[in-house]
Amino acid sequence: NAGVTQTPKFQVLKTGQSMTLQCAQDMNHEYMSWYRQDPGMGLRLIHYSVGAGITDQGEVPNGYNVSRSTTEDFPLRLLSAAPSQTSVYFCASSFQGAAYNEQFFGPGTRLTVL
Amino acid sequence: AQTVTQSQPEMSVQEAETVTLSCTYDTSESDYYLFWYKQPPSRQMILVIRQEAYKQQNATENRFSVNFQKAAKSFSLKISDSQLGDAAMYFCAPVGQGAQKLVFGQGTRLTINP
């Protein structure tokens, strides 16, 4: 199993550009989520999904969109990048549709917005 | 809403010694789970240990154990016989059984001195 994969590993954007961070898992996990990690602030939840076709907002959803058309994939879209979105982004998945199971994390994407 | 406080931004310990990382939380949930995750310099988030709040017995995983004080809402992590590979950021995270959102503390950076 590849586990949770994220692409790209690094990305530099200009203000106003849009892009999609990809996340995929091959463990048939129903729960998937996106976090951002900023220095000194731990991980903050952006969006999550408890199954295909179901998504909801987390703690810091503004400026991001998600969709979940398949169990395996959970892409995160930045609509119009801003310097405040410079961060490291992590995707995670867990068994069943619950946050209280062990989270399996991807390796992260470091995003810089100029 | 849940809040999590890790009051030690940084800690250091000599190799082979024991160190305890503290975590306090606030939750209105009656049934919940508590997690410690580790993030080494590779950036990969890894589950260290999990505690079910309804269990009185403290969880243990090899050199890692917790001191769970439910009334005090305290969930500390003890690392025995510290090893160089234990150097990492450690994050505490409580989550209610019915909750879909995982809330992380701000983290404690642990340094192991040889």
Image (cartoon, coloured by chain):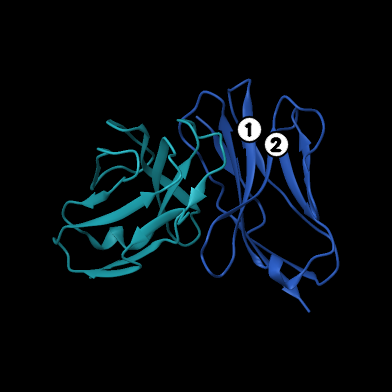
Q: Name the residue under label 2.
A: B51
Dots 2 and 1 on the same chain = yes
In percent of width and height, residue A59 lies at: 39, 40
In percent of width and height, residue A26 lies at: 41, 48
Q: Look at label 2 and name its amino acid.
A: Gln
In the displayed image of the protein, which residue is found farthest to the front? A1
Please identify the quarter of the rendering in which residue B33 is found: top right
Q: Which residue is drawn at 31% across and 33% down?
A: A52
Q: Which residue is drawn at 67% across and 68% down?
A: B87
Q: Mark 1 points at which residue?
A: B33
Q: Which of marks 2 and 1 is nearer the N terminus?
A: 1
Compared with B53, A69 (above or below) is: below
Q: Residue at x 78, y 79 (%)?
A: B114
Q: Residue at x 16, y 58 (%)?
A: A18
Chain shown cyan: that is A
In the displayed image of the protein, which residue is found farthest to the left? A16
Q: Look at label 1 and name its amino acid.
A: Tyr
Residue B71's disc is: none
Where is the C terminus of chain A found, in terms of image quarters?
Answer: bottom left
Colour of chain B, in one word, is blue
Would residue B33 be found to the left or right of residue B76 on screen?
left
The chain under label 2 reads B
Observer-nearest of B61 and B22: B61
In percent of width and height, residue A16 lies at: 13, 60
In percent of width and height, residue A29 lies at: 44, 39
Secondary structure at badge 2 equals strand
